Amino acid sequence: MIPVAQALDHLFALVGPLACETVPLRRAHGRVLAETVLAQRTQPPFAASAMDGYAVKSAEVETDALFKVIGESAAGHGFAGTVGAGQAVRIFTGAPVPQGADFVVIQEDVTRRGDLITLNHGVGTAPNIRPAGTDFTAGTPMNAPRRLSAGDVALLAAMNIAQVPVARRPVVALISTGDELVMPGEVPGDDQIIVSNTFGLAALLEDLGAVPRILPIARDTPAALRQVLTLAAGADLIVTIGGASVGDHDLVADVAAEMGMRQSFYKVAMRPGKPLMAGMLAGVPMIGLPGNPVSAMVCGTVFLTPVIRAMQGLGEAPAPRRQMPLTAPLEANGPREHYMRAVADTQGVADAGRQDSSLLSVLATANALIVRPPDDPARDVGALVDVIDL
Ligand SMILES: Nc1nc2c(c(=O)[nH]1)N[C@H]1C(S)=C(S)[C@@H](COP(=O)(O)OP(=O)(O)OC[C@H]3O[C@@H](n4cnc5c(N)ncnc54)[C@H](O)[C@@H]3O)O[C@H]1N2
Ligand code: MOO
């Protein structure tokens, strides 16, 4: 058994960043920017009014000052002339500030009669003008790598970047193994259950920007497993689920070895997730997850998530942790690092109850994992513990 951190290092050694591809802006959300891009324009491209009002010369702004309105500047339709002494241009938010003007009096501070305006008492000192380039200038970078948020997409659009270089999505083959498994919607036999991990992991992978490929369930014979593993050709990562332990029907390690897998490790000092394995199979990185549903999902958070991030060029880092105070006491931990299903709130964090690694109903109530170091002593309310958000 190796420690979790060492297992993660082995996994990072198996994968590398995938190639870059270019996608239209509308497809860029959630993808990872693979190359730094530069703004194609300056925003705003001209000094723009921040308010609806009147553009005048700042030197002339004082209570009761009188101006003649000589034209209008609207967004998309600027005023071609120049504002002279005693003159004002009606202006709207986003419109170019005309030449000669350097101040916008908001319309609430003005009394208008026909073509004449007078300034009321209390016009502020803020010019209400956004200078050209206030937001960004041509050549301003958006640095890679970063996962593109909705806000990033808006910024890329404003920068006039219609084609975006992003990391290719990792294609992940998901293989569940076991004679007991049938697909959701099918009618299980008396000895059967519904496959769950595959769907949970597919959802997790999609959230991370990967493309899961759910392969047929591999039955518990070497031939069946070999056949399904062959179907995984072309994937960037193979993830098997179950069949990783020591039972007579746990075939993954043997079949993969027979097919030439170069094993990096087998068994990790963690709970749940002990029978995790990984290696390289015909040039494709392969991770064998334990079959217990919560074990598979916890390994998804602790291992798959950092690996998928690394494949998208986001660097090699474990799942982020933060410290929180306990709101319920914890018993002493055993010799394996324990990832306890837990509920975090504004007060702190408490374990979510039964920690058996088959209990998806408990996982569904959890929003965090408490990480206990090996042999951590009993902890009282208020003690600080490491937490991974789910
Ligand atoms: N003698 C020992 N027995 C076990 C050990 C051990 O060290 N010695 N380790 C236990 C631990 S820890 C785990 S975790 C499990 C992992 O076993 P496998 O990876 O071989 O998984 P299976 O035996 O195939 O399945 C375990 C359990 O999970 C269910 N399962 C499997 N795949 C799915 C799926 N895709 N969707 C839903 N449920 C699934 C399966 O039906 C079993 O109930 O081994 C312990 N045993
Ligand atoms: O350590 Mo196994 O991964 O629960 O239940």
Image (cartoon, rainbow, N blue to C red):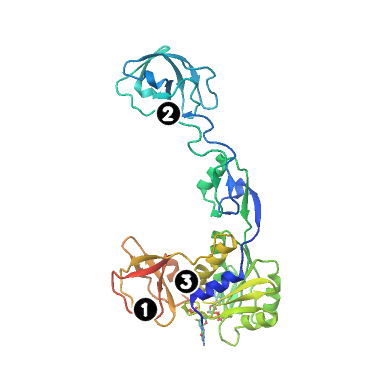
Can residue 227 be seen in the rendering of this structure? yes
Label 1: which secondary element: loop
Mark 3, mark 1: which one is toward the viewer? Answer: 1
Q: Which mark is residue 376?
A: 1
**Dot 2, how many residues are within 10 Å of its Cα: few (below 14), some (14-19), or many (20+)?**
many
Mark 3, mark 2: which one is toward the viewer? Answer: 2
Cα separation between marks 3 and 2: 54 Å
Counting residues from the start of the chain, the first of labels 1 and 2 encountered is 2
Label 2: which secondary element: loop
Q: Is mark 3 within 8 Å of ligand 1?
A: no
Q: Quadrant of residue 122?
A: top left
Q: Nearer the viewer, residue 276 or 64?
A: 64
Q: Are marks 3 and 2 in contact (CB under 8 Å)?
A: no
- Left or right of 112, for residue 265: right
Residue at the disc numbered 3: 360
Disc 2 marks which amino acid? Met
Q: Position of residue 352 (x, y in %)?
A: 38, 71
Label 3: which secondary element: helix
Q: Is mark 1 within 8 Å of ligand 2?
A: no
Cα separation between marks 1 and 2: 60 Å
Counting residues from the start of the chain, the first of labels 3 and 1 encountered is 3
Q: Position of residue 300 (x, y in %)?
A: 52, 69
**Dot 1, how many residues are within 10 Å of its Cα: few (below 14), some (14-19), or many (20+)?**
some
Residue at the disc numbered 2: 51
Disc 3 marks which amino acid? Leu
In the image, is residue 94 above or below residue 146? Answer: above
